[in-house]
Image (cartoon, rainbow, N blue to C red):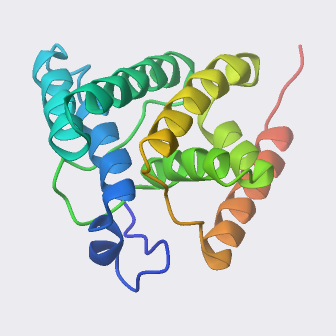
């Protein structure tokens, strides 16, 4: 997986030290791996992480919103989701896209939200995933947990990736 530098921080380690980004990434990682181990430890780990950082009530609400988002994302993903192990100091491409979705919602940035969402989900399921992502993003925002806006360099890279995928996939389509 690629090492990505995001946010206003100069290194991924700095970025992941921010509470908002760490909660999104670590929660995603715990729940992305839940399919392989039956889910119970990861769900419990996510709940503990969120309650430790946000308090019992707000943490439970945010963890439940993340679980709903991840459930719909896993069900509607174009490819299996990729994630580093919890605690890793690197950020995978799918983790960057999830950050883009949540950040886009929190900052009313429809362009980055749509670009990131369409790179992860099938077109037929976009509304389902978007609704659960919005619930999660706004739950975090209501708890005072707000991601930093994505830097222009990362936005440009995500958009270029999206354009490349769109052009490649259109050329590869075969009609019978």
- In the rendered image, which quarter contains the N terminus? bottom left
Q: Is residue 115 above or below residue 153?
A: above
Q: Is residue 98 above or below residue 76?
A: below
Image x and y of residue 138, in percent: 56, 36
Image x and y of residue 16, in percent: 30, 65
Determine the residue positioned at 50% across, 15% down: 75
Residue at the bottom extreme of this rendering: 10
Determine the residue positioned at 89% across, 13% down: 176
Does residue 78 appear in this view? no
Image x and y of residue 124, in percent: 75, 16
Image x and y of residue 86, in percent: 18, 47
Q: Is residue 103 left or right of residue 25?
A: right
Q: Nearer the viewer, residue 124 or 16?
A: 16
Determine the residue positioned at 60% across, 45% down: 101
Q: Is residue 107 above or below residue 18?
A: above
Q: Is residue 110 left or right of residue 155?
A: right
Displayed quadrant of residue 61: top left
Residue at the left extreme of this rendering: 41
Q: Is residue 14 left or right of residue 99?
A: left
Displayed quadrant of residue 66: top left
């Amino acid at each position: 997986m690629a090492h990505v530098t995001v946010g206003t921080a100069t290194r991924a380690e700095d970025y992941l030290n921010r509470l908002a980004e760490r909660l999104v990434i670590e929660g995603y990682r715990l729940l992305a791996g839940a399919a392989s181990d039956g889910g119970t430890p990861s769900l419990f780990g996510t709940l503990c992480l969120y309650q430790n950082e946000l308090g019992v009530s707000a943490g439970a609400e945010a963890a439940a919103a993340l679980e709903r988002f991840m459930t719909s994302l896993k069900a509607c993903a174009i490819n299996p989701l990729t994630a580093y192990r919890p605690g890793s100091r690197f950020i995978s491409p799918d983790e960057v896209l999830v950050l883009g979705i949540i950040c886009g919602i929190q900052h009313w940035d429809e362009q980055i939200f749509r670009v990131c969402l369409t790179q992860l989900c099938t077109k037929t399921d976009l509304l389902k995933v978007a609704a659960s992502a919005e619930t999660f993003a706004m739950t975090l925002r209501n708890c005072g947990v707000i991601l930093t806006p994505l830097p222009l360099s990362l936005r440009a890279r995500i958009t270029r990736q999206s354009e490349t995928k769109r052009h490649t996939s259109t050329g590869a389509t075969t009609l019978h």
